[in-house]
Image (spheres, rainbow, N blue to C red):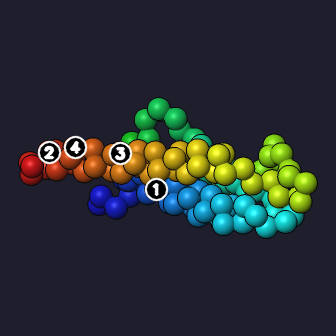
Amino acid sequence: MFQKLGIFQMAHAMATHAGRLQVVTAQNMANADTPGFKAKSLTPFKDTLRTSGTGTAQRATRSGHLNGAAPDGPVAIPARIILDEAAQSDPNGNSVAIEDEILRSVEAKRQHDRALAIYRSSMNILRTSIGRT
């Protein structure tokens, strides 16, 4: 019953995206001195989340509710790895800037922490609603 709550799916998608962003950032940093290496990035999280298209309108949560079928809710599509075209290249053709990668790593940590905070808050609300604290 509680496995398909949209908020938990979104928190999972956010945490997964943050983990993949951290992996791409680590690969960029590891190849900072590799001649010809082009810095990579991920598509932003907002571009990887596909919603049911209902927005804030009422929607069915189970098959008999509101005379309709239950929608799947938010679904995460895999983030694509893209080349960072805006990055300046060194004379050896490498486009990795350590400073940019450090900032990207910090943003990935913030995104992961935000996903965990959403998950924790949702679990607290769920526990309170069923009478457990």
Q: Which mark is residue 15?
A: 1
The percent coordinates of residue 30 (x first, y second) are 66, 66
Q: Can residue 13 be seen at all in this image of the molecule?
A: no
Q: Looking at the image, is mark 4 or mark 3 earlier in the sequence?
A: 3
Rendered residue at 60%/63% (across/down): 26
Label 2 to label 1, Cα distance in Å? 24 Å
User: Pointer 2: what residue?
Assistant: 128
Label 4 to label 3, Cα distance in Å? 11 Å
Mark 3 element type: helix
Rendered residue at 44%/41% (across/down): 59
Q: Looking at the image, is mark 1 or mark 4 earlier in the sequence?
A: 1
Q: Which mark is residue 125?
A: 4
Alpha-carbon neighbours of circle 3 within 10 Å: few (<14), some, or many (≥20)?
some
Quadrant in the picture for residue 46: top right
Q: Is residue 125 left or right of residue 29?
A: left
The percent coordinates of residue 97 (x first, y second) are 72, 50
Rendered residue at 36%/51% (across/down): 116
Label 2 to label 3, Cα distance in Å? 15 Å
Q: Which mark is residue 118?
A: 3
Q: Are marks 4 and 2 in contact (CB under 8 Å)?
A: yes
Q: Which mark is residue 119?
A: none
